[in-house]
Image (cartoon, helix red, strand yellow):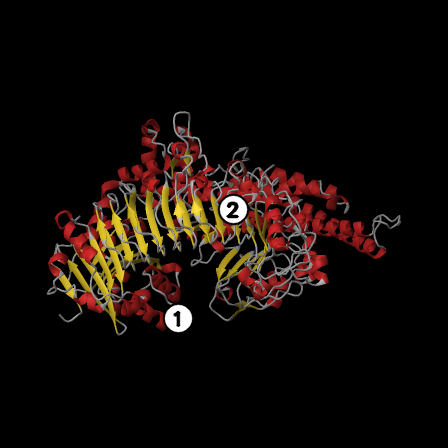
Amino acid sequence: MAIVVDAFAGKLVERLTAALEAKAIMILGVKEELLRLQRRMRRIGHVLKDAEKRSMQDKSIKGWIAELKDFMYDADDIIDRCMHEGTKILQEQEAHESSTSLMVCCRLHPFSCVKSLRFRHAIANDIKSLNDKLEEISQDKKSFKFVPDRSIDANAVSKATEYHHGSSLPESDVVGSGIRNNSRRLVELLITENEQKCRIFAIVGMGGIGKTTLAQLIYNDPKININFIVKSWNCVSKLSDTELLKKIIRDCDGDYGKSTTTTELQEKLRDTIYGKHFFLVLDDVWDSHKWLDLLKNPVESGAAKIRVLVTTRDENLARLMESIDIHHVNKLTTDSGWELLCKQVFMGGNLEGMQTLKDIGMQIVEKCDGLPLAIKVIAGVLKPKDHSRRKWEMVLENDAWNGEGLPEDLRGALYISYEALPFSLKQCFLHCSLCPTNKPFLLSDLVKEWIAEGYVKTEKNALMEDIAEDYYKELIRRSFLQPSLDRADQSSCTMHDLLRTLAQFLAQHENFCGDPEEANLNSTVTKLRRLSISSTKEIVGLPQVILEQKCLRTLYLYKSCSGLEMHMIGRFTLLRALMLNGEMVKHIPNNIQDLAHLRLLDLDHSQIHELPYSIGNLTNLQFLTLVNCKSLSSLPKSVTKLGNLRCLSLHNSPLSHVPRGIGKLEYLNDLTGFVTGDGIDGDGQEVSQQQVQEGCDLGELQSLNNLRNIRIKELERAKEGASVLSTKRRLKGLVLSCTPQSERDNHQAYTEQETSRIEQVFDGLCPPSCIEDLKILGFFGSRYPRWMSSTSVHTCLVDMIYLSLINCKSFSCLPSFGQLPHLKYLRIDGATAVVSIGHEFLGSGVKQGNRKPPTAFPKLEYLLMWNMPNWEEWSLTGEDNEKESGKLLHFPHLERLSLRGCPKLRALPKDLDQASIKELLINGDDSLQAVEDMPSLTELLDITDNKNLSRVSNLPALKGLIVKNCPMLKNVEKLDSLQSLRFNDEKSNSLPEWLIDFLRQKQQNFDNQFQLYLYITVEALEGCLRESPAWSVLEQVPRISAYATLDNENMYLNYDKATSSYDTNLHE
């Protein structure tokens, strides 16, 4: 069932319909036979939904479907062959336009004409045979008495709502008092002092029952953060031994450097956590090796206190790992299950809808058998039902609850939720079975792969890439994909093990992921169509059955996998998608031109030196990705013949030019790494005559009207400005870059003439107003582009969300970015000519309504001002317009303000106290003397390497303070809400006076959760011991964790006032 038969049939009819109107088909003279095929497929398509549903229980129907699928694959291949050969004939016809031949083939070379006649005869016979075969299949279907499906919304995919995950655990996942009580109990056990240095706790339960949810609740508990200075979360089943060690080291702020072996990494881990309190979560553990053989020794020999939390389905494994407490996760009660369902379905708090449907909903919850995962995925089925009672009843009465033919743990809600997916989403979900378990699903990859496989439905006036992104968001909305915790934009996802198992089970006869030599392939049952190779072997071979069948359509070799014998690939002439990643790939198959069906060719991170000219024969190719191919310096001219190309990715590959003629590729919408090549290189020197002839300038982009993402580099080579972007109404992402002076030969400076020309070039590159993500790198003009002026920026960049100006060293005044209504992220990095930032940066703000004052940066969440060595003044008002600017609000939603590498900045703007700021990070700002009077700064102040900072005062809402290498700091006061203070000074022999004074002031009103972290010298650590003068102050601090290094050995002091716990490895 790897291909969803009704979806495949619909796509085949769609392809036939489009082909019938194509010139390539007309010239072959096979239109009538294809029309017969289309009519029959349309008739048979009405019964396929019922057929696929009944095939789970009826083997004869399953056999009929298998026969139909084989036929449809053959028909799909026939269409490709027709389009491929017809296109070649048309191209030859254009090449011989002046011919006066009166032959039937008209205007073709005689040899081409004979060859064309031969192909037309052969293809016509093949299509007739297919029609005869379909007639037999159609006759056979009558005996099954299928019920026709006349629904028109089966393929509908709703527009996915926008998601914003600010934490690792969505509140909607937590229901009932049970899970909170269990979390509190386990947290108390984890933080309780005990003579036993290392203690292991286990959460045990069946798949999908909520083990990970409980573990996340514990991991994010504030008491855990206070009691453990370092912690690490790891999904063990998805990481190799070395990957797991590296991740834990990173999580603990360590650096594994060039260490690659297990032994080296174990030593690095031990040193990283030495003397510290360490909390480790091992989620989804399937065997004890990861703890007993890999982690136990370095963790126990390093950390001063270790608490390990394990989640597993196997209680015996928890006992083998010597767990002192095993918590069994119980199934949800019906009431808690109903609460979870309501949180997922009735997100707007529709109380009336909840009550009206509660009786049916409770019965559905009971059928989910108390499994949170089952309830969440069934919620994805109910959510689009418009709260219709009858539609909920249909879900309750669905026969698929019995799940005959499925493994027991995949029955019920999981399969029903799969059944309820639109056809196109079913195929996309099953495709995910090809991704190795240790690799996340990347949105950009899935979009390409789904389109190449033909899973994405075409819609008028919409790019398939946009539709595919909606599919991705819909799978998230239905809980089939889970957004990764480290990507706020949801561009990376994972999948629950049970759902992955369901995809693998349903796709098992056509898809395989792993080492093919270990696959159990039965040639009488299995026709492997898609193979994803994941193996640790140096060279992987393919079983004979795969080589004999020759029906692979997809072949993936991932970067982290081994090599493959290249000569084998040419045998699979039906390939649609070919991925050959990694340094083991030195060249591509010599007969690549024979892969006429190929849509996706991914050679990222490979060591190829060139592409063969014959690649231009791949007329069906849609995606060509050559990212980070460090040995590739040029592309063949023939890539301009790839008329169906949608994506050309060249980022981080050292190409000298892009062939002239790229502008003919009308479907191209993703072009990264476009090299501006007009015969002048980055140093103003002439390049070879061949590059002059083959390279292309900005004008080549004029006709690419479907561009949605483009990255242009080496813009200093452009002859002149060209207005080639402003009309691109689909453009969302844009990167404009110039070669930095540091990367030019002899570090040659740009001339005045070159500076003037680059300003003109950028003036002409005004993006369309629909642009959302803009990066400008290395721009060396003395002013910013005219479309960034205060009178233009709010209209030219009205939809802008992410904006970065990096190493734009020459202009002294920043644009009025405060006028951008949707801007969320702004990074100014390397603006070395900026001396002062004033009211011009805010502009006139954005109007918020008739009665509200305008607001500058109304939606900005991240403001990063980095590496600005000459910046001295920052004001949010102006001398000439102070009265007017006083009416302007600013930064109402700032999550983080980061000021780094600005050594001349003398003060923060006085009106910054009006802004709402969660985190303020100040690093390397040597002239700054005070951080004070900021009542709305709440979460964190991090002051690092600020040589003249002397005062931190009146930050009443601040919870966390980090101080590192601020030698002139004298006064820290009025931090009423502070819960955590980290101080780092590895030079001084004693604690600074300001710290002792601050702790003395806080003695009477310490928060019980307050924790003091010290990273200091051994001499300073000795001054913190019980007999020292400072101890009378330190002993009043609720918790202290102090560390120092002596002869590469970590020394420590840990103290807890509440329990009178005092532990150190220093001799007192």
Q: Amino acid at mark 2?
A: Leu
Residue 830 image point, x, y percent: 47, 54
The label number, if any, that marks residue 259 in the structure image: 1
Task: Answer left or right for 688 relative to 953.
Answer: right
Q: Nearer the viewer, mark 2 or mark 1?
A: 2
Residues at badges 2 and 1 in contact (C-beta under 8 Å)? Answer: no
Q: Amino acid at mark 1?
A: Ser
Secondary structure, mark 1, is: loop
Which of 778 and 176 lies nearest the eye of the viewer? 778
Residue 59 image point, x, y percent: 50, 49
Looking at the image, residue 576 lies above or below residue 258:
above
Residue 817 image point, x, y percent: 47, 41
The crowd level at tag 1 (other Cα within 10 Å; few <14, some 14-19, many 20+) is some
Task: Answer left or right for 364 relative to 1013.
Answer: right
Counting labels gives 2
Quadrant assignment, res 236: bottom left
The residue to which callout 2 is attached is 774
Task: Answer left or right for 33 relative to 827.
Answer: right
| Mark-to-mark CA distance, 2 and 1 | 37 Å
**Can you name the residue that lies furthest to the bottom here?**
1047
Secondary structure, mark 2, is: strand
Which of 373 and 748 lies nearest the eye of the viewer? 748
Residue 943 image point, x, y percent: 31, 54
The label number, if any, that marks residue 753 in the structure image: none
First-in-chain label (2 vs 1): 1
